[in-house]
Image: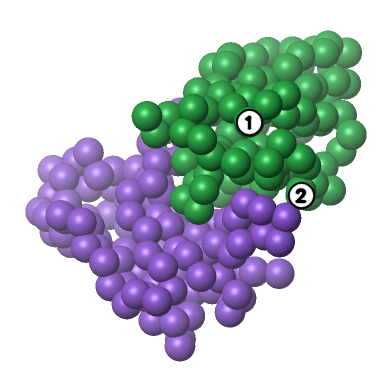
Chain colours: A green, B purple
Amino acid sequence: DTEVTQTPKHLVMGMTNKKSLKCEQHMGHRAMYWYKQKAKKPPELMFVYSYEKLSINESVPSRFSPECPNSSLLNLHLHALQPEDSALYLCASSQVTLFFGPGTRLTVL
Amino acid sequence: GENVEQHPSTLSVQEGDSAVIKCTYSDSASNYFPWYKQELGKGPQLIIDIRSNVGEKKDQRIAVTLNKTAKHFSLHITETQPEDSAVYFCAASRELTGGGNKLTFGTGTQLKVEL
């Protein structure tokens, strides 16, 4: 099973809302990642978790809050987002090779 | 930090022709080079990868070459088909001291295979 799953597929939220993105993998990978991708651009790294601990935060605003409840799950909590945060949010996991999920298309109104 | 340049940004070929995409990286610590294909509305899908101790790798119609000295690597697709149409990203990867790998992506190539 080389699949990373993400929910929801689409999310529309207002600037005062709180929502969460969820990611799951069952490949036994110990590293998990959040990326943000704007249209016609490559993915940009946001966070890296290794062995359930945050190892990289690429200077992401605090309105994005990651959480790794266990080795298979990764969440991204969203609060007080701005319209410019609208993007495709990708989760990935790896031993060495990164495998990406299908993404959550987020629209902030 | 790492910088990956990718060319061309768009590539249009006739079905059955070959397509070549080239990338250059800057960080000598990068030791793993995956290529991803991304279709509209989907996440990037790994299509082939190469490690720094290997010069060439082939998988059916897809091949990748690496020139470590020049810090160049290239993707070659032969006998292109319409379903090859997508955005292709090269990437350079290095291991993180805390675990995991940091990928730096190229800017992407929009490949269009015309009938």
According to the picture, the residue beneath numbered tag 1 turns out to be A71
Q: Is residue B31 above or below residue B104?
A: below
Which quadrant does the N terminus of chain B fall into?
Answer: bottom right
Quick check: A78 left or right of B74?
right
The structure residue drawn at horizontal position 37% and vertical position 59%, both measured from the top left corner, is B49
The amino acid on which the numbered mark 1 sits, given as a three-letter code, is: Ser
Q: Secondary structure at mark 1?
A: loop
Quick check: B83 left or right of B21?
left
Whether residue A32 is visible = yes
- Crowding near pointer 1: few (<14 within 10 Å), some, many (20+)? many
Q: Mark 1 belongs to which subunit?
A: A
The structure residue drawn at horizontal position 72% and vertical position 55%, both measured from the top left corner, is B98
Q: Nearer the viewer, residue B17 or A19?
A: A19
Separation of disc 2 and disc 1 at Cα?
A: 16 Å
The amino acid on which the numbered mark 2 sits, given as a three-letter code, is: Ile
Q: Is residue B47 above or below residue A17?
A: below
Q: Is residue A67 above or below residue B111?
A: above
Which quadrant does the C terminus of chain B fall into?
Answer: top left
Q: Secondary structure at mark 2?
A: strand
Q: Quadrant of residue B28?
A: bottom right
Whether residue A107 is visible = no
Quick check: A84 left or right of B5?
right
- Crowding near pointer 2: few (<14 within 10 Å), some, many (20+)? some
According to the picture, the residue beneath numbered tag 2 turns out to be A56
